Amino acid sequence: MKRILASVTDGKGFDIGLVLLPLAFLFIMSGLPLVYNVVMSFQEVDMFSLGSFVRPFVGFKNYVDLFSQPETRPILLNTALFVSSSIAGQFLIGFGLALFFWMNFPGASWLRGLFLVSWVMPGLVVGAIWNWILSGDFGVLNFLLRETGVIEGNIFWRSDPNYSLWAVIIANIWLGTSFNMILLSVGLSGIPKDLYEAAELDGANALQRFFTITLPMMRSTIGAIIALGLIFTLQQFDLFAGITSGGPNNSSNVTQYWAWDLSFRQYDFAKGATISVIMIVFVMLASVVYVRSTRHEVRG
Amino acid sequence: MSDQLRNRVMLAVALLLAAIYLFPLYWMYITALKTGSSMFATPPKFLPSEPQWGIYAFVWESRNMGRYLWNSLVIALGAVSLIAVLGVGCAYVLARYRNAWVDIGLFLILMLQVLPASLMVTPIFVGFSQFGLLDTPRFAVILAIAAKSMPFFVVLVRATFMSVPMELEEAALVDGNSRIGAFFNIVLPLARNGILVSAILIFMQAFGEFVYSKSMIQAVELQPASVGLNSFMGPNTNEWNNIMAYATIYVTPVLAAFVLLQRRIVSGLTSGALK
């Protein structure tokens, strides 16, 4: 007993204790729910059996039902469109801004940091602000687009099924751009300056330098950022709650919102769990890519 | 001379870019100050003609914001304390050793970091309700947020511990400190700043958390400000100046803290996410 105590205060036991307690917490609060999620996706769960531990197993019925629903396909396509457009927009704008702020001038790093306010704001507030900016009759975005001649009539961003998903995408691009930019800036500052000096001496112009030095040197950073972008866009929930609530008629619904909607609006917890399982598998695959592309740095 | 000119031009362009990017924020502040009719004017006014400063007090009273913000504060502080107590030690051990176990632990933690809250809330809700945790809904939300955010905190703090030289700790051990003594007297004080910045980041996230609170807290008296904002925004609302005033009161403290600590937050964030 004394030996164990001594080990906890002054030996290996100290380290093991420090790491086991949080891991146990994470196991109970994240690991078990993950397993429970899979179990529920094979069960019949309704309001009456919610509180009981014994529920009938139904095999793959939930999965079969899910994929025979008419809205499943459009929602999966919406998710793909939401994720790819958001990542593309965030990355391209973020990269442009990062390249601009990379050219050193007084105040650059402070101003660059200021962009990150979009990232620390509560997601629902961002949703509320964009909801108002994108409003059909009185929205300031429609006004600016009209004045510059891009559009003729007002676009009803939130209520037109053709635009509702794009309303959330625009807001999400705004939200994620700053994070992309900051991480890309870190990658850019890691490129040795003498590479550029050498290239300049050899007569390479700015475009050539970008494609032969910047892009290849940024490869692992870019991989990590795209994977992180995938992870973050699949986590995006608040903007849907704040702007369109998935409507009208599911035209802006995506899986991560749909899973919640099924569980907490339609009380179909089994279906909600089923979508969760599918999406979590997907997210985990993405995170393996992320972990792999940052592995040497994680160990470093 | 031409260098100076170049710097000025660059700075002007940078300011312009920042202004465009931060326009939504400006629009929130301006809309809050507009009257009910000037809010819907076409063309919209980019400067309010008669700022309605009274709106903040009005919204604070009518929406019961004190209560909402208090709940947000309770949830955020609870989550941050729980995360800090559990996460600091974990990050320390993961920074001090380099072996297969640590790699496995890190891998698991990185995997847990990516689970979307809106997908995890279904099993967590059902499980918590079976164990009666939903009777204390704010505590349930604190637990859920802690599980969600702790991995990120561990990754950030681990980067801080890596920069504390091991030799200092060894010297303390040689001088007769126990492991606990060396940890609390030497390592923790040296890593204090990094831990603090990470905790602030986690606090900001928890302060704006929505999914868990919306799903698990049914009683209005216990709901945080994010849920309050959500119920304020009905589908056909036209109270946008009031909503923007609500949003202003909600985010201004967060924004102020961010601008003050900007440099530290940005460097802490980047060191954890990529390096």
Image (cartoon, rainbow, N blue to C red):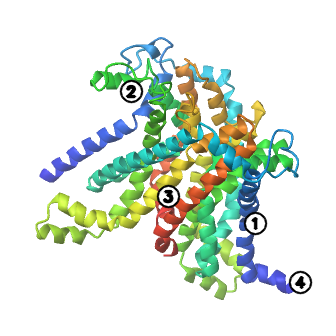
Residue at (63%, 25%) from the top-left corner? Answer: B232
Residue at (71%, 51%) from the top-left corner? Answer: B144
Element carrying mark 1: helix
Q: Amino acid at mark 1?
A: Ala
What residue is pinned by disc 3? B269
Query: Do circles 1 and 4 both sit on a common chain?
Result: yes
What residue is pinned by disc 1? A24
Chain at tag 2:
A
What residue is pinned by disc 4? A1
Label 3 and label 4: CA atoms lie apart by 43 Å
Circle 3 crowding by C-alpha within 10 Å: few under 14, some 14–19, many from 20: many
Expressed as whole percent of the image width and height from the top left, the position of residue B55 reads 56, 20
Label 1 and label 4: CA atoms lie apart by 23 Å
Expressed as whole percent of the image width and height from the top left, the position of residue B172 reads 63, 82
What residue is pinned by disc 2? A141
User: Which of the 4 image quarters holds residue A14?
Assistant: bottom right
Circle 4 crowding by C-alpha within 10 Å: few under 14, some 14–19, many from 20: few
For the N terminus of chain A, the quadrant is bottom right
Q: B38 or B249: nearer the eye?
A: B38
Query: Do circles 3 and 2 both sit on a common chain?
Result: no
User: Which of the 4 image quarters holds residue A137?
Assistant: top left
Mark 3 in CB contact with mark 4 (< 8 angstroms): no
Chain at tag 4:
A
Expressed as whole percent of the image width and height from the top left, the position of residue B194 reads 55, 62
Q: Nearer the viewer, mark 1 or mark 3?
A: 1
Mark 3 in CB contact with mark 2 (< 8 angstroms): no
Q: Nearer the viewer, mark 2 or mark 4?
A: 2
Q: Amino acid at mark 2?
A: Leu
Label 2 and label 1: CA atoms lie apart by 49 Å
